[in-house]
Image (cartoon, coloured by chain):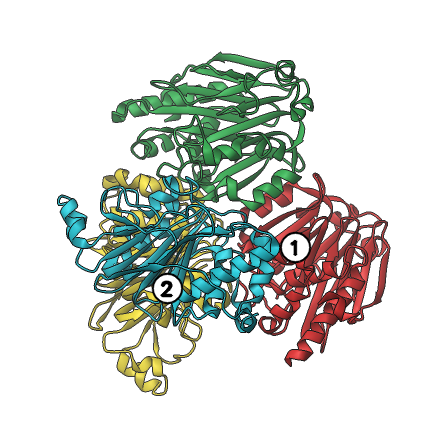
Chain colours: A cyan, B red, C green, D yellow
Amino acid sequence: MCRWMGWLGQPVLMDELLFKPQHGIVDQSLHSRMGAETTNGDGFGVGWYGAGEGPGVYHSVAPAWGDANLRELAAHIESPLFLAHVRAAIGSPIQQTNCHPFRHDGWLCVHNGYIADFHLLRRDVMLAIAPDQFADVHGSTDTEVVFHLALTFGLESDPIGALEQTVGLIEATAREHGVAAPVQGTFGVSDGTCLWAVRYATEGPARSLFASADVDTVTRLHPDNPRLQRFSEGDRLIVSEPFADLPGAWHEIPEATAVCARRGGALEERPFRPRVDAPASVA
Amino acid sequence: MCRWMGWLGQPVLMDELLFKPQHGIVDQSLHSRMGAETTNGDGFGVGWYGAGEGPGVYHSVAPAWGDANLRELAAHIESPLFLAHVRAAIGSPIQQTNCHPFRHDGWLCVHNGYIADFHLLRRDVMLAIAPDQFADVHGSTDTEVVFHLALTFGLESDPIGALEQTVGLIEATAREHGVAAPVQGTFGVSDGTCLWAVRYATEGPARSLFASADVDTVTRLHPDNPRLQRFSEGDRLIVSEPFADLPGAWHEIPEATAVCARRGGALEERPFRPRVDAPASVA
Amino acid sequence: MCRWMGWLGQPVLMDELLFKPQHGIVDQSLHSRMGAETTNGDGFGVGWYGAGEGPGVYHSVAPAWGDANLRELAAHIESPLFLAHVRAAIGSPIQQTNCHPFRHDGWLCVHNGYIADFHLLRRDVMLAIAPDQFADVHGSTDTEVVFHLALTFGLESDPIGALEQTVGLIEATAREHGVAAPVQGTFGVSDGTCLWAVRYATEGPARSLFASADVDTVTRLHPDNPRLQRFSEGDRLIVSEPFADLPGAWHEIPEATAVCARRGGALEERPFRPRVDAPASVA
Amino acid sequence: MCRWMGWLGQPVLMDELLFKPQHGIVDQSLHSRMGAETTNGDGFGVGWYGAGEGPGVYHSVAPAWGDANLRELAAHIESPLFLAHVRAAIGSPIQQTNCHPFRHDGWLCVHNGYIADFHLLRRDVMLAIAPDQFADVHGSTDTEVVFHLALTFGLESDPIGALEQTVGLIEATAREHGVAAPVQGTFGVSDGTCLWAVRYATEGPARSLFASADVDTVTRLHPDNPRLQRFSEGDRLIVSEPFADLPGAWHEIPEATAVCARRGGALEERPFRPRVDAPASVA
């Protein structure tokens, strides 16, 4: 049910992190070890900040492991902040508008997990999207709706707070419809300066999520890995699933937790607490 | 802005009507003469009744003229009733879920034209779809919403009446939003026994629509066309744009008119009058 | 490295054998158990005899498990003889012209396996193709070259003999280039009346290949399987990998063996012996 | 039969030249004015020099006008030298390996035109490719064969000389097969430092080809075009067809002529004279 990764650090060619690591995200498209499914072959996407205005996105319905264009782009686009996502569809069509990252203005959003019985909830949660943004939902995934709800709730000024309200609204809507355990997953969002990530499930264990340790720890653990020697202070990875060639270099993000990775290396962590604020004002 | 055709008659290999006529629908994908655009290269679809349960559909994001699979399928699938559609996208993404024909249970629907300023109206008209069908809208076209509105209004028992209510609702919604001339186009729907078609525009001339004349007339006009000699009584074509090799064999469907082609050759014609019935019951 | 299946029997909707069996070929695209790879997600194809002239083919670069059109076609095309193939690419591009089955006139061909170091041998073996067929090779797979070699060697009059000469030529060419163990795999070919299959490896164990037992045995083994009760005498399946819901109903085809399934249920078996005939005449 | 453009100059976001000019190359994919066909919708490609090693390429089977990814990439990739190509297929399949630019090591190659009766000549001209490069031909276009012939003849040390030998060999092969007027078109090649282009037809007028005038002339002609005011000395465009918003700013490259655009603004022009050198050494 999808895997994703985010990079915040020095500018790198994207293939340094997409293709070159053992068990990087592209390998996870074919052989995920910790995901709900082994195969994440129902399309993929990358979104990056770099040249041009705002983030660029590349979405493909092909499996990441076999897309010739992805190899090309990864080897020729350099970015100091990017998100990549490989998809295992669970019902919704395999089409570019269902590929993550989703974008709105300068923001990107990825998700691993699901809204349970989304077809039962879709109408009600879409009605909570700001009416003038309703027509911006082009695909049919739960994630795109989550993203537009979060934008409605103020993602651009308080990303984690907006996601807390979004999840709260979905949980409240699910209760009305008798849907149990509605929210499962991890979310990643960015505005090009920071990388926010959330790990949360209404019930039971949430999907896996890890942040790379600080660079000193990583390079001390792996003195012989030449790729790592190029890492510098402030480089940070957030991943659904660790890269195989960096054992020990990962910090598991706890359940019901949000993190924010900032330029310079800071990784802030706080509880993630869904809430319902003044529902009348958004319905 | 799209071209479409429907066939109701003896079972034929689909390529008899898709590829073999001069200026058939596939040729119209590259060189439309009467359409709003010359090129209808933003995907296509066919829906046919034949073997198996209900209609089959084949949707592709490739231009019809260049899709190798379409040639194969057309040359190897036989059907007594099918609809084909070539698309010129006007804003919504090029993806299979935006390709016509749309299907619901045993019904197919195609459309040539547009809902003006659909992004302004989308939310309100989607709210008029029966709530339990809301999540069945997988793509982002106006047509898919029109189809689900018509299903909500009883398409399966009274196709033309349901389309009249659908158009009425859209026109009423447009008035509320200050959108002028909201509905433009031709619609084709079928349940596998009959073929209904509508030509209508809120204002100004509607997109072109033609029905083939009865078979006697057609064969008398073209005694040397071997393909026509195979036509039999009761065969009927409805097309956005006549095939070039059959001049004189077409009957232009008047503005604001609905037709119903039935097995055996009958072609019924009646006025198409959008109306708003008891809006409270559907909102 | 690919999985395939062939059906020869009563006309059936293709999804009876593609989608409905437990661990049928579409399931094998995602979860192969006996193949060299678990995932066969690099495109697929079906070729069928039925309506229209000669076989139809449908090729797609999408994984079989996620292709919406395949579900449609399988549920609406009926055929008494068809071949399906799911691909795991090993170097050559993922494109429709590299998808099996390959077709020439009324013949279809599928392959599971490889020609070792094909890039070293490609030029020399392509020169052995009849010059007037050279330009018919549109893709870049080893299989398409094998098929055109077999056509050159008289596939249409003696399928197994032609494949023996083809494999013999490839092995001789490999020896000249110092390539060991050049041929590995199973081949399936049909002209619409019979289904020929070969299991062979120059060295070591060949890829798996099975034929269904005669219908009496199958139905006696599985008296409660309703799908099987519809089978009739003369129905025959040849598969890379057995369907899970029919244990015991399969006959493993021995190494270095060719079989021919004929209408009526006969399954002939003979040794497969590569040979080089009069090389001067074809080189 | 295709349109292409090349840019050599200051680094620009590719959309400055792909999408923003009136009647730029993307517009030419839908509405070519000087090409053999109006529609060039059978795939496209861009190849650019910039970040990463060697040129990157992006190939798509979708029409350029409708490819969402192309808009993204063009708006977020900056390059001082790139080639773009929109394709009208004439027989060979629509697949990424048939999309231009073709790449070998650091070289890119595009072509507008055709080799007449290529299916008759393909075998013989492919035999003239250096045997160890034969297996690098992955698609089925004439252009890819031309490119590998030119590499065989020394493209990397003398691009125009190698193309003269390539065309000479094709013309000689055509004579043997009784094929008249075999070579038609324009070629563009680059190694990332210079941009070479050729306009040539064995008989009759060759496809159109233009180079932009020097920057002073262009800006003097169009003092009110803000995009042009950003041009600087040494910027150079070579195009199949002029951009509409720059009338007068183009120099038509004569028939049977090769040009080389170099950094700094030099545009060298010389006759293009196909020749056959020591055929024995390459056959």
* Residue C18 vs residue D1, the one in the foreground: C18
Q: Is residue A87 left or right of residue D195?
A: right
SS class, disc 1: strand
Residue bearing the label numbered 2: A56
SS class, disc 2: strand
Q: Residue at x 18, y 54 (%)?
A: A215
Res. B238 image quadrant: bottom right
Q: Chain letter of disc 2?
A: A
Relative height, residue D106 to residue A193 (above, below): above
Q: Residue at x 68, y 20 (%)?
A: C232
Q: Quadrant of the C terminus of chain A?
A: bottom right
Q: Label 2: few (<14), some or many (≥20) within 10 Å?
A: many
Q: Is residue D159 left or right of residue D95?
A: left
Residue bearing the label numbered 1: B102
What is the total number of numbered labels drawn onto the structure image? 2
Q: Chain letter of disc 1?
A: B
Can residue D35 be seen? Answer: no
* Residue C133 vs residue A169, the one in the foreground: A169
Disc 1 marks a residue whose amino acid type is Phe
> Percent x, y for residue D95?
44, 49
Q: Residue at x 41, y 60 (%)?
A: A109
> Percent x, y for residue C3?
47, 30
Res. A245 image quadrant: top left
Separation of residues labelled 2 and 1 (CA atoms): 32 Å
Relative height, residue D265 to residue D116 (above, below): below
Disc 2 marks a residue whose amino acid type is Gly
